[in-house]
Image (cartoon, grey):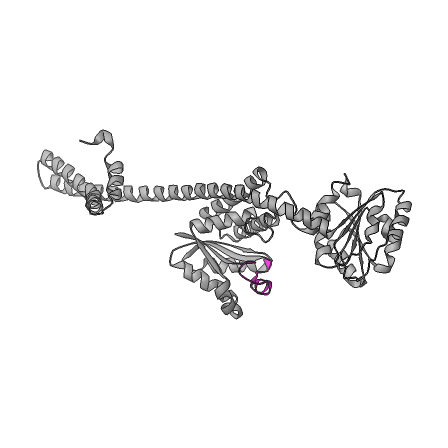
Amino acid sequence: MVLLALGLNHRTAPVQLRERVSFAPERIPAALGDLVRLPAVHEAAILSTCNRTEIYCRLAPQGVRAAEDWFLDQHPDERAALGDALYRHLDADGVRHLMRVACGLDSLVLGEPQILGQLKQAYRQACAAGTLGPQLQRLFHSAFAAAKQVRSQTELGVNPVSVAYAAVRLARRIFADPGRLTALLIGAGETIELAARHLREQGVRRMIVANRTRPRAQALAQALGGACEAIALDQLGEHLAEADIVISSTASPLPIIGKGAVERALRRRKHRPMYMVDLAVPRDIEPEVGELADVYLYNIDDLEALVEENRRSRQAAAVAAEAIVARKVDEFLAWQRSLEAVDLIRRYRRRAETLGEATVARALRRLRAGEAPEAVLHRLGRELVQRLSHAPTAAFHRAAREPDGEALAWLRRLLCPPEEED
């Protein structure tokens, strides 16, 4: 049996291809059922996210091509494009790949934590579909343990490496209780959406989304849920004083928040501090706003410097994380070998029992035919020795013909311990 990890990710395929070959959650149970119905496939799981689609299988060696053909058959219109995008990792390489994925070492953003939750969801789906057996179950749990150890023993995921996340994390240095804050988000693009989701994760409950086109702001507010409302840009002056956090990222050619507007808002706030982040180029917030005593203003250059420093920090932490993964891979492979040893011992004993039973049966026939019991017992002993030693003796002869002598030395240690040598 072999372990296979097969798929594509952000390094091997553009987003357009990744979108077309992803599995919708409702498709996965049926797809898993189809996959394990292949004669050579015994266990399977499917991981499908925006950045990767992968299958993990335990299968017979001849099943690798069948699993790949199955994957291609799921997306017949993409066969040509998938030919160059698919990667295949077998056995130890497949084990290492899954563990690196779980730890965020194979992610677009090094060390990002979301992939671990997505991998746990893939595990639960495969369990529910009944397509996981002892090997893949053990592998997934080993990957989860590796990820936990990386999180607890390294700083791989500690420092933010996106400007949106950095903007949100900086707010924690200013405000102690995110649950009591109001965030004003100006714009409705990808950066603002990402910042909004990070704010939710940090505990900010109330948000106001302002955008030039109000329907787009309403769509984002609805997607965020909770206490989130949408306003038009011309309503900024009415709501600015409510905002403890302001994050802006629009395509406006001129600033949309001036120093005077912020001064008026501060007076209405009785000079409670405001944290403002300008992620736009050109800038959305006049630089002079940063001169106000109760305002903490950061622009994209400030955050990019922080993000770059954090990227270097994560790269250093990744070295320690890779060492943890290497140890966990060795542990899993050792467990696999122990299973193989148990199976080998079982087969060897079954063969010995079969030989013994056949030899005893012949001895009993001789006794019933009237042969002397002592002669039958002596012959029984000789036959047992000959039959049980035949295979090891043949192995000794083959090993003796090998030039390096390594196999012969190994057989000597195994079959002729020092205390039994002549």
Q: Which residues are magenta?
A: 8-25
Query: What number of labels is visible?
Result: 0
Quadrant assignment, res 215? bottom right
Residue 202 seen in the current view: no
Q: Is residue 347 left or right of residue 120?
A: left
* Picture residue at 42% right of the left edge, 41% below the top: 335
Asked if the stretch drawn in magenta spans residue 19, the answer is yes
Q: Is residue 60 left or right of residue 221?
A: left
Asked if the stretch drawn in magenta spans residue 324, the answer is no
From the top left corner, tell me how far across and down residue 395 is, in percent: 22, 45
Please tell me whether residue 231 is drawn above or below residue 133 in the rendered image: below
Please tell me whether residue 11 is drawn above or below residue 367 in the rendered image: below
Q: Which of the two residues, 412 or 27, is positioned nearer the viewer here? A: 412
From the top left corner, tell me how far across and down residue 7 is, in percent: 50, 58
Please tell me whether residue 322 is drawn above or below residue 283 in the rendered image: above
From the top left corner, tell me how far across and down residue 324 is, in percent: 50, 41
Looking at the rendered image, the quarter that the C terminus falls into is: top left
Q: Which of the two residues, 35 or 306, is positioned nearer the viewer here? A: 306
From the top left corner, tell me how far across and down residue 145 is, in percent: 53, 41
* Picture residue at 68% right of the left edge, 46% below the top: 306
* Picture residue at 71% right of the left edge, 56% below the top: 191
Residue 111 seen in the current view: yes
Q: Is residue 284 left or right of residue 317?
A: right
